[in-house]
Image: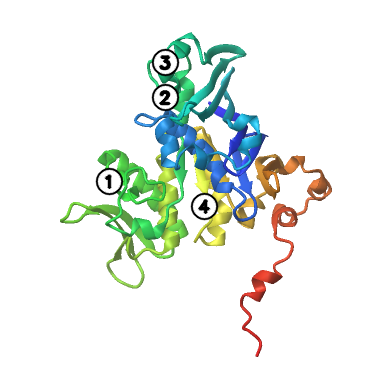
Amino acid sequence: MRITHVGASNWRNFKTLDFPVDARLFIVGPNASGKSNLLDLFRFMGEVASTGGGLAAALERRGGLTKVRSLFARNHRKGRLEIDLRLEDGSDTWRYFLSVRNEKGGRNRPVVDQEIVERNGETLIARPDAQDEADPERLTQTHLEQIAANQPFRAIADYFTKVRYFHLVPQVIRDPGRVVSGDPFGSDFIAQMNAMPARTQGAWFRRMQDALRAAVPEFESLKLEVDPAGRPHLVAGYRNWRENPARQNEADFSDGTLRLIGLLWTVVSTPANGGVLLLEEPELSLNSAIVRALPTVLATAQRDQNMQVMLSTHAPELLDDEGVLPREILVLSVTRDGTVARQLSCIEEVADQIEAGLPTSEILSGLISPEDLSGLVAVGQGRRR
């Protein structure tokens, strides 16, 4: 299964979203244009569908519906937050549509305004239904999150629960006092590794070890050790000039090495039929040669694990890979009416540049780079005397 089309209204920076999705999606745009917020749409759906999650919990984690809903929502789609996803699973086509509004009558809770599920054009679920009208409390939950209700379309629910997000922050990982289960920034990243069965963990570590030997100078080995307080640590051996490898743990790793280990673990641990992998600027702290290899690494993983990859990036090394096609690049542009998302292949003003074979990063620079940075440069100038 994979997502083939994304539609949304009033999601964070975006008044409207409407674009197709292939096996991978590269999201580019200026700072604060909404790249992270777009990735968060898929995380949100994963949290709604997950065990112990649900609509109310997913919105609460984000500060409530008013924090998620676009500032442009008041005069658009009656202020509803709407998400409209199309999916394919072999010869089957699916549609999942969710509309959320605040409850009337002063309670102001987020409730389901509409929930529609279609398979091959046939409507399986259309809410609110007669039961919802008889018991409006039911509208505080989606059918997507309820095992008793999602049986006809559980394939979609299962797919959304496989959404995985990677944006490890090295400083968070190194802080032993900040371990939060399910932290998207990686505070429990090493604990997740340690929780894997020993046989599986060993097989995955061997694959990662081979990759790290190729990418990190003098790297020799990687393993997990548990300290006397019961905390697991990553321990790496470096050959250098010593007869026995020098040992370092995560507190000593460079930011780049730690992020690379995290990225490799995310790739090797993705299950078969692996859902959606969301990557937030995977190039951060990595050598440019490694960044250039990432499209190939991800493409190989996609073939083996049947996953979709969506990533935000600023890296020319990624975007200029000859395998990256204009239709796989989503360009975000900030306007007075919210952020607009367009496929690079659909932007007429650069069609000639694409046809001429200019480097993709050069084409994108003309679309998303700030036009005047004189104010930024001026901040470094002292006051004239």
Residue type of the residue flagged with mark 3 = Ala
- Residue drawn at x 58%, y 30% as measured from the top left: 82
Label 4–label 2 contact, CB within 8 A? no
Using the image, determine if residue 31 lies above or below residue 252.
above
Coordinates of residue 88 in the picture (x, y in percent): 58, 23
Using the image, determine if residue 250 lies above or below residue 189.
below
Q: Name the residue under label 3.
A: 149
> Tag 3, which secondary structure?
loop
Residue type of the residue flagged with mark 4 = Pro
Residue at the extreme top: 130
Say whether residue 272 is visible.
no
Cα gap from disc 3 to disc 4, whole angstroms: 37 Å
Coordinates of residue 352 in the picture (x, y in percent): 84, 48
> Tag 2, which secondary structure?
loop
Cα gap from disc 3 to disc 2, whole angstroms: 8 Å
Q: Mark 1 points at which residue?
A: 194
Q: Which of marks 4 and 2 is nearer the N terminus?
A: 2
Residue type of the residue flagged with mark 2 = Glu
Q: Name the residue under label 2.
A: 145
Image quarter of the C terminus: bottom right
- Residue drawn at x 40%, y 49% as measured from the top left: 208
